[in-house]
Amino acid sequence: MSRMLLHGTASSLELEAVAFLRLMQLASPALPIGAFAYSQGLEQAVEFGWVRDEASAADWIRGVLTEILPRLDVPALIAMHAAWSEHDAGRVRVLSQFLHACRESAELGAEDRQLGAALARVLDGLGIAEGAAWIADEDATFVTSFALAAVRFQLPIAGTVLAFLFAWLENQVAATTRLVPLGHIAAQRVLSQLLLELPNAAERGLALPWAEVGFLAPRLAIASALHESAYSRLFRS
């Protein structure tokens, strides 16, 4: 196998392995974008007592994972993947603006913008030229940069969606260890339980017609809006 690489060729197994490793790179908590600083309303849900133990933490995270992300972020990721693939910069911007318009609070919009810009900076550093323009762009979103990375890394959309969902899930479970708090074994139980939800959530997002994109999540909106004015907090959202 190494001999093939030295001569400039690669087997299908090697190509699949590189794609898989690129997916792991995008989903890794080591990606330096600061996602660990955000809880996406979870901190306020703990403050209200809506999330108070392992079972309620799993329920809260499952609700967002299965009922919100497949109805908005995943379809947007799919649409942006297609737009980046077709070099349609106008479509990418419209989709980014749409995502910002759908965020329930100012802090969720700011989080999306900051994470999107941070990932764009990483991509620029990796030689993906389109990333540079989004570093200081007010329309930047995490999905925008994630889709760009997936296209330039030549990753299939199904794997891209799973990596996106896993990255979100792992960050939420990590937040519960500090907020609830959950011990690390309990957190691993929640993660192991919710991993089983990922394929179905991905399939639902992949199958959703664009005309049906959107959701209503009053508790998430309330928690996030009130978190903006919390007297003290561990997380930025």
Image (cartoon, helix red, strand yellow):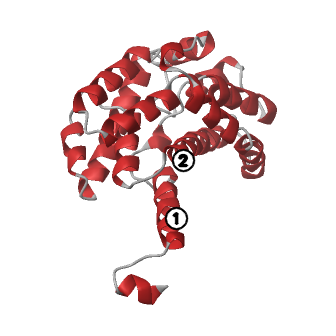
Q: Residue at x 49, y 35 (%)?
A: 38
Q: Is residue 226 above or below residue 192?
A: above
Q: Nearer the viewer, residue 43 or 58?
A: 58
Tell me the SS state at disc 1: helix
Q: Position of residue 172 (x, y in %)?
A: 60, 38
Drawn side of residue 36 relative to residue 97, left or right: right
Q: Residue at x 33, y 42 (%)?
A: 85
On residue 134, the disc is none
Q: Is residue 47 above or below residue 131?
A: above
Q: Nearer the viewer, residue 43 or 32?
A: 32
Q: Are marks 2 and 1 in contact (CB under 8 Å)?
A: no
Q: Position of residue 190 (x, y in %)?
A: 75, 42
The kind of residue tagged 2 is: Ala
Q: Is residue 41 above or below residue 181?
A: above
Q: Position of residue 62 (x, y in %)?
A: 70, 30
Q: Residue at x 53, y 41 (%)?
A: 161
Q: Residue at x 44, y 23 (%)?
A: 108
Residue farthest along the bottom direction in this orientation? 3
Can residue 114 be seen here? The reply is: yes
Drawn side of residue 63 relative to residue 18, left or right: right
Q: Is residue 52 above or below residue 127?
A: above
Which residue is labeled 1 in the image? 16
How packed mark 2 is, by other alpha carbons closer than 10 Å (few <14, some 14-19, many 20 or more), is many
Which residue is labeled 2 in the image? 163
The kind of residue tagged 1 is: Glu
Question: Rounded to the nearest whole Å, what is the CA distance between mark 2 and mark 1?
Answer: 15 Å
